[in-house]
Amino acid sequence: MRPLQISAETAQKLAESLNVPLEQVMHMPQHILLAKLAELNTNKDSEKKD
């Protein structure tokens, strides 16, 4: 599997927001990354409603 085709800046921001190492973000399968981002977005939306 090849690394994600994202910029270094984007990878750093994703690693920070997901609380995972940068290397893990770069080698994470795209479908898993998208699921984690959706989960993160859902959590932020629920925090705003409270």
Image: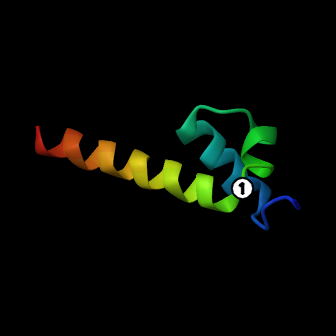
Q: Residue furthest left?
A: 50
Taking the image as shown, residue 32 lies to the left or right of residue 49, namely right
Residue drawn at x 88%, y 61% as measured from the top left: 2
Q: Position of residue 20 (x, y in %)?
A: 65, 33
| Colour mapping used in the image | rainbow
Of residues 48 and 3, the one drawn nearer to the viewer in this rendering? 3
Q: Secondary structure at mark 1?
A: loop
Q: For residue 7, which quarter of the picture?
A: bottom right
Q: Position of residue 48 (x, y in %)?
A: 19, 44
The crowding category of the residue bearing disc 1, from other C-alpha atoms within 10 Å (few below 14, some 14 to 19, many at least 20), is some
Taking the image as shown, residue 13 lies to the left or right of residue 41, namely right
Residue bearing the label numbered 1: 29
Q: Is residue 11 above or below residue 2?
A: above
Q: Position of residue 16 (x, y in %)?
A: 60, 37
Taking the image as shown, residue 49 lies to the left or right of residue 8, namely left
Of residues 7 and 31, the one drawn nearer to the viewer in this rendering? 31
Please state the total of marks drawn on the protein image: 1
Looking at the figure, which quarter contains the N terminus? bottom right
Taking the image as shown, residue 40 lies to the left or right of residue 7, namely left
Tell me the kind of residue under disc 1. Pro
Q: Is residue 31 above or below residue 28?
A: below
Looking at the figure, which quarter contains the C terminus? top left
Q: Is residue 28 above or below residue 24?
A: below
Residue drawn at x 81%, y 40% as measured from the top left: 23
Residue drawn at x 60%, y 53% as measured from the top left: 33
Q: Residue furthest right?
A: 2
Residue drawn at x 51%, y 48% as measured from the top left: 36
Q: Position of residue 34 (x, y in %)?
A: 55, 59
